């Protein structure tokens, strides 16, 4: 589960570092999903 979380964070940083590769809506969608994923991760510990 921790590995999944770190992969998720790596993905977010990748998006933030290289936003031109994705449309704004894709980035927004990823960032909307993130809090739910982090909550899910936090409760699974």
Image (spheres, rainbow, N blue to C red):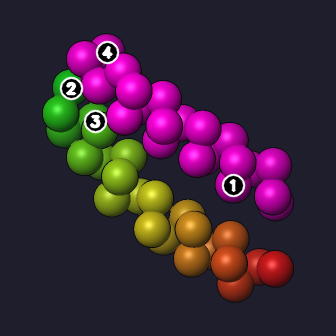
The quadrant holding residue 41 is bottom right
Label 3 residue SS: helix
Q: Secondary structure at mark 1?
A: helix
* Res. 5 mark: 1
- The local crowd at label 3, few if under 14, some if 14 to 19, many if 20 or more residues have their Cα within 10 Å, is few
Q: How many marks?
A: 4
Residue farthest toward the bottom in the current orientation of the protein: 43
**Contact, CB < 8 Å: mark 3 with mark 2?**
yes
Q: Residue at x 68, y 41 (%)?
A: 7
19 is within the stretch colored magenta? yes
Image coords of residue 42 (percent x, y): 68, 78
Q: Which residue is mark 2?
A: 23
Which quadrant does the C terminus fall into? bottom right
Disc 3 marks which residue? 26
Residue identifier under label 4: 21
SS type, badge 2: loop
Q: Residue furthest top?
A: 21
Which is nearer the N-term, disc 4 or disc 3? Answer: 4
Q: CA distance from mark 4 to mark 1?
A: 22 Å
Q: Is the stretch drawn in magenta largely helix, strand or loop?
A: helix
Q: Which residues are magenta?
A: 1-22
Based on the picture, tell me whether residue 7 belongs to the magenta stretch. Answer: yes
Q: Are marks 4 and 1 in contact (CB under 8 Å)?
A: no
Gap between marks 4 and 3 measured at Cα: 10 Å
Q: Residue furthest front?
A: 17
Q: Is residue 45 left or right of residue 21?
A: right
Badge 4 marks a residue whose secondary structure is helix
At x 29%, y 38%, the residue is 27
């Amino acid at each position: 589960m921790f590995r999944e979380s770190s992969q998720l964070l790596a993905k977010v940083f990748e998006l933030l570092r290289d936003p031109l590769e994705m449309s704004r809506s894709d980035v927004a969608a990823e960032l909307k999903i993130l809090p739910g994923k982090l909550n899910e991760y936090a409760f699974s510990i």
